[in-house]
Amino acid sequence: QVQLVESGGGLVQPGGSLRLTCVASGFTFSEHALRWYRGAPGKEREFVARISSGGEEIHYGDSVKGRFIISRDNAKSTLYLQMNSLKPEDTAVYFCKVDGYPSWGQGTQVTVSS
């Protein structure tokens, strides 16, 4: 059974940084690409970033390019999202997702506000 547990969210001022973590289990972590998505009330879930199984290929959504960095540690079955230069419009619940499985974690809330 695939399990995804996101953490690291919180309240941060505009211009600040946060690092999100997603600990995964129930599948062979090193064989799957992973993604971050975010969702806000009343809006469709938005693609944030994707990283290939070995970490060589990375893609970002246009709204986070140049500010967010996705990475992974296959030895720890953990996915990361370093978020820099945060803006109020980055406020959302952030979720990790495994390519090839329908499961979602509970997400972690990020609020950017002064």
Image: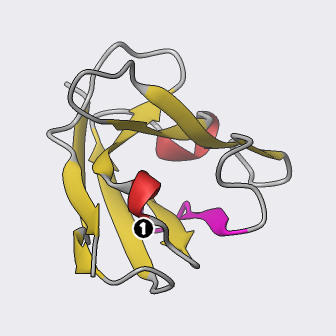
Q: Which residue is mark 1?
A: 76
Q: Residue furthest front?
A: 114
Tell me which corner region of the image, top left, top right, bottom left or bottom right, holds residue 32.
top right
Disc 1 packing (10 Å; few <14; some 14–19; many ≥20): few
Looking at the picture, tell me which residue is in the foreground, 65 or 105: 65
Q: Seen in the image, is 63 located left or right of residue 76?
A: right
User: Which quarter of the image is occupied by the C terminus?
Assistant: bottom left
Residue placed at 75% from the left, 56% from the top?
Answer: 65
Please state the extent of the stretch shown in magenta in the rendering.
Answer: 67-77
Q: Is residue 99 above or below residue 70?
A: above
Q: Position of residue 60 (x, y in %)?
A: 72, 45
* Residue 52 among magenta residues: no
Q: Is residue 60 above or below residue 97?
A: below
Residue type of the residue flagged with mark 1: Lys
Q: Position of residue 110 (x, y in %)?
A: 27, 61
Q: Residue furthest left?
A: 106
User: Which quarter of the image is occupied by the N terminus?
Assistant: top left
Q: Position of residue 97 (x, y in %)?
A: 42, 33
Q: Secondary structure at mark 1?
A: loop
Q: Position of residue 70 (x, y in %)?
A: 62, 60
Residue placed at 35% from the left, 13% from the top?
Answer: 102
Residue placed at 43% from the left, 79% from the top?
Answer: 14
Q: Residue furthest right?
A: 56
Tell me which corner region of the image, top left, top right, bottom left or bottom right, holds residue 39.
top left
* Residue 73 among magenta residues: yes
